[in-house]
Image: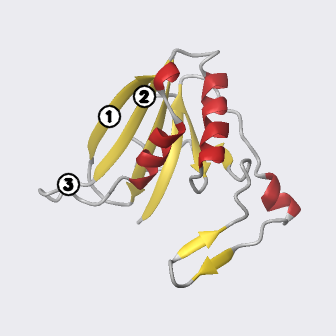
Amino acid sequence: MSVLSYFAADVSLPEVVNPHDIAGDRELVLDLDSGIIQDGDYDDDFSICDCSGTEDLFTEKAYCAELQWTYSEGRAEAVLAYIRGLLRHTDEVELWHICMGMGERPLIRSKTIPISQLRAEELGKLEERDLWEDFYGIPIQYRLVIQK
């Protein structure tokens, strides 16, 4: 089982290449006492790549793209700018946070929010959601529906 965050929309989702994967200028430091990985905290240290056709995606949208990142406020602001750009071409974008490979239909918890009210902290809260089974043994997926 693995965790996946992805966008879903009815318009093509442009890929974003992480410049630090190419340049190799990222140095990871693991603080063993706190268990925190420090990665240089670059605001553009994320990527978005096609994941259409991946199993366990329960969206009805035509296009899907994986968001590969570790939350930071600066990165979240860059992701918000990406979402705003998408909303120039469509009425809504979904951002999902899921656990893959659970083998059964999940419980989907959904929240709808206009882009004008979406803040970086909300993206961080989505990433922190517990994806494991609820009280009844049903896996959970979270969907944030972002509208114009």
Q: Are marks 2 and 3 in contact (CB under 8 Å)?
A: no
Residue with the most extreme bottom position:
32
User: Who is closer to the viewer here, 113 or 22?
Assistant: 113
Q: Is residue 109 left or right of residue 113?
A: left
Within-10-Å neighbours for mark 3: few <14, some 14–19, many 20+? some
Residue 59 in view (yes/no): no
Q: Which residue is drawn at the image coordinates 78% and 66% (left, top)? A: 26
Q: CA gap, disc 3 to disc 1?
A: 16 Å
Residue for badge 3: 138
Instruction: State the image coordinates of residue 3 (x, y, percent, origin top left).
Output: 45, 59
Query: Which residue type does callout 1 highlight?
Result: Ser
Within-10-Å neighbours for mark 1: few <14, some 14–19, many 20+? few
Residue for badge 2: 145
Q: Are marks 1 and 2 in contact (CB under 8 Å)?
A: yes
Residue for badge 1: 110
Q: Which residue is drawn at the image coordinates 69% and 66% (left, top)? A: 39
Instruction: State the image coordinates of residue 51 (x, y, percent, origin top left).
Output: 58, 46
133 versus 143 height, above or below: below
User: Who is closer to the viewer here, 109 or 139?
Assistant: 109
Disc nearest the viewer among 3 and 1: 1
121 versus 127 height, above or below: above
